[in-house]
Amino acid sequence: MRVVIVDDAEAAACRAAQEIAALVRQKPDAVLGLATGGTPVRCYRELIRLHQHDGLDFAAVRSFNLDEYLGLPADHPQSYRRFMQENLFDHLNIPCEQTHVPDGMASDIDAFCQQYEQQIQAAGGIDLQLLGIGSDGHIAFNEPGSSLASRTRLKSLAAETVRDNARFFGSEADVPKLAITMGVGTIMESKQCLLLATGANKATAVREAIEGAVTARVTASALQMHPHTIAVLDAPAAAQLEFADYYREAERLNESVRNTPAH
Ligand SMILES: N[C@@H]1[C@@H](O)[C@H](O)[C@@H](COP(=O)(O)O)O[C@@H]1O
């Protein structure tokens, strides 16, 4: 796994946005897997800036979001559809019908989950999946103990996840306890994964995900088995990595090779 360590959250957001922008420029109809939560907000802000000031064009881009709380209608202030509209889609030229967020009000959940998987396949699969990471090392809402081969399905949220997300709802009691989430297996089929993590509160999860055992206890650790994953971290999130100095030197050398004109 490529590990890119930068100074702070803003630099990490810009670095992640650069990766996404490079793909969209190279493949205008790219299929993006998108994430929610506090971490991606700065990255989305940079994508909006690139669209508004550098002409980054999202007209042919398709997107699939990782998850949605069960029972929240799309217009609920804390629904992930609302989050994506307010933090990204409303500020880009991506047609709404090309954006997909799991339906928190689906009447037949199993049928919806199968349909979501089929839609991803019909789009040609996800080209780049942006991922955050929970403080317990989960990706999407694949909580500890989730199968590393799981597909889109209904999951119950772990107590730590409910606590972490209570900040968006006002109290733990108001946090939905169930969500529809892409599975680890679904995520692993993405052509590329981009793990974005910032803040000291993610340092343990990041260490376990990148340098720990591949285990269902830390579903982000499955990314060690993905052939094209880049982890973009700020210094606080990378603070517990045993091989941080090696990652920094490897990235410096990679950059020098990438920036050397071909002979
Ligand atoms: N389902 C989301 C994840 O996709 C996200 O990565 C995680 C961390 O969010 P934050 O970036 O706010 O720490 O929160 C939730 O669990």
Image (cartoon, rainbow, N blue to C red):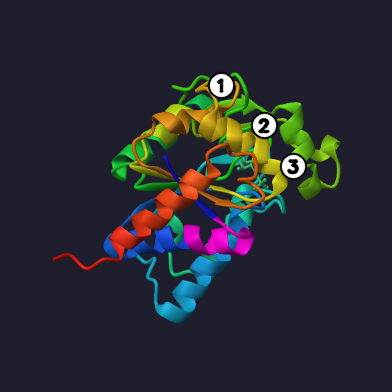
**Alpha carbon separation for disc pair 2 and 3:** 13 Å
| Residue 85 placement, left or right of 77 | left
Which quadrant of the rendered structure holds the C terminus? Answer: bottom left
Disc 3: which residue: 165
Tell us which disc is closer to us: 2 or 3.
Answer: 2
x 56%, y 40%: residue? 67
Outermost residue, bottom direction?
Answer: 53
**Alpha carbon separation for disc pair 1 and 3:** 19 Å
x 62%, y 27%: residue? 143
Disc 2: which residue: 136
Disc 1: which residue: 146
Q: Is residue 138 visible?
A: no
Q: In the image, which disc is placed on residue 161?
A: none
- Mark nearer the N terminus (1 vs 3): 1
Amino acid marked by disc 2: Asp
- Mark nearer the N terminus (2 vs 1): 2
The magenta region covers 6-16
Secondary structure mostly taken by the magenta-highlighted segment of the chain: helix
Identify the image quadrant of residue 219: top right
Q: Residues within 10 Å of mark 3 (few under 14, many from 20)?
A: some
Give SS at disc 1.
loop
x 33%, y 55%: residue? 30
Amino acid marked by disc 1: Ser
